[in-house]
Image (tube, rainbow, N blue to C red):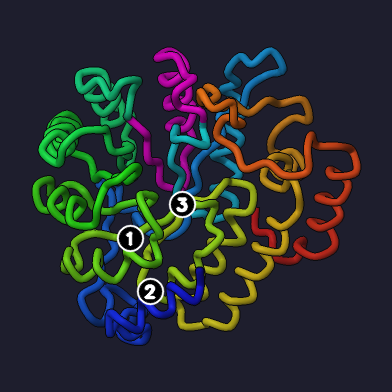
Amino acid sequence: MMGNRRKFLQGTGVSLGVLAFAGQGAMAAGGATIAKSPNGKALAGVFPIGWTPCKPDNSFDADAMVKQQRFLNRGKVAGMAWPQNASGWQSLTPEEWHAGAEALASVKGDTALVLGVQTTGFNTANSQAYAKKAKSLNADAIISLTPPGSDADVIAYFKALSDASGLPMMVQAVGNVSVDSLVALAASVPTIVAVKDEAGDPLERAPDLLQKTGGKLEDFSGGGGMSFFPELELGFLGTCPYTGLADVLQACFNAYRAGRKREAYDSFGRFLAFNALPHANEYVMKARGVFAEDAVMRANPAPASGAPAGGRRRGGQITDAHKAEIRMALDTYLKPFLVA
């Protein structure tokens, strides 16, 4: 895969040096400028997808939601997006969505709040209602997955969200959304400032996307942040990992932006080493004392295929040995680098 990416980048004639950020604003050659929310918060950096913590009976836990946002504030993490796929958004009732949004908005701090507004079936009126609520809660931005349908359908949907809130928007591109479709969408809806690109290989799509949007669209990625450093080399302005080591990944971003690339590389290596442990993301928020040991993370309904809902799980069910290994790695290798 990396060989294919390398050939692709060579074929485009795009220099990594040309695409790299100059440190204080726009990219040197046609890259995106950092957008800010109405609250003055930068919409760039690490924006983890928040968990939806629940009690053992799977009932929503608003207090744990508050603790999660405070954790990100302590870690000086740029932002948080909730609820998206890793949050189990399809499982949330409207009452739970409102309770979660209000819990997050109650926390004051520098971590930007981006609320996910897609609804079951991508009902436009229901999504607009969430967008209006986000505005009333003083959220920094909203985000939505792309609905199924034609380019015209997708544009109409995001225009409706923009009309409802007026907030900056992030697009989570999924399915078969092409780069040209994203370019047309960004041109048609000026409040769109960023795309979380999960509709293909983000490393391969980035040069085309950045060039064709002419510095008007920030490129983010998902995939747990596992390819963030090479993405930074291409001019990405953010990533949406899990929450548990978001502070470590934010340190990587900050160092890279400040020109300390070797330091950024080392931070990214620590992040990857920890994530090599089975169940690392599943347990780290408990190991770091944010969630209770018996907390349950809400997941989307299991797909028809019977695959685990919303998850990349390895090593079977988590055991006491897994938990001990995760705690050991935090204490032995990561403790000096944890901010939160």
Tell me the magenta residue range: 88-117
**Residue position marked by numbered label 3 in the rendering:** 222
Q: Quadrant of residue 105?
A: top left
**Residue 107 sits inside the magenta stretch:** yes
* Residue closer to the observer: 273 or 133: 273
Residue 150 vs 60, above or below: the answer is below
- Which residue is at 56% across, 60% downward? 226
For the residues marked 1 and 3, what is the alpha-carbon distance in whole angstroms?
A: 10 Å
- Which residue is at 69% across, 67% downward? 270
Amino acid at pointer 2: Leu
Residue 110 visible (yes or no): no
**Residue position marked by numbered label 2 in the rendering:** 234
- x and y percentages locating residue 164 in the rendered image: 17, 29
* Residue closer to the observer: 166 or 171: 171
Local SS, label 2: helix
Q: Earlier in the sequence, mark 3 or mark 2?
A: 3
- x and y percentages locating residue 90 in the rendered image: 44, 23
Estimate how packed mark 1 is, as few (under 14), some (14 to 19) or many (20 or more) residues with alpha carbons within 10 Å: many
Q: Earlier in the sequence, mark 2 or mark 1?
A: 1
Disc 2, disc 1: CB below 8 Å? yes
Q: Quadrant of residue 305?
A: top right
For the residues marked 3 and 2, what is the alpha-carbon distance in whole angstroms?
A: 15 Å
For the residues marked 2 and 1, what is the alpha-carbon distance in whole angstroms?
A: 10 Å
Amino acid at pointer 3: Gly
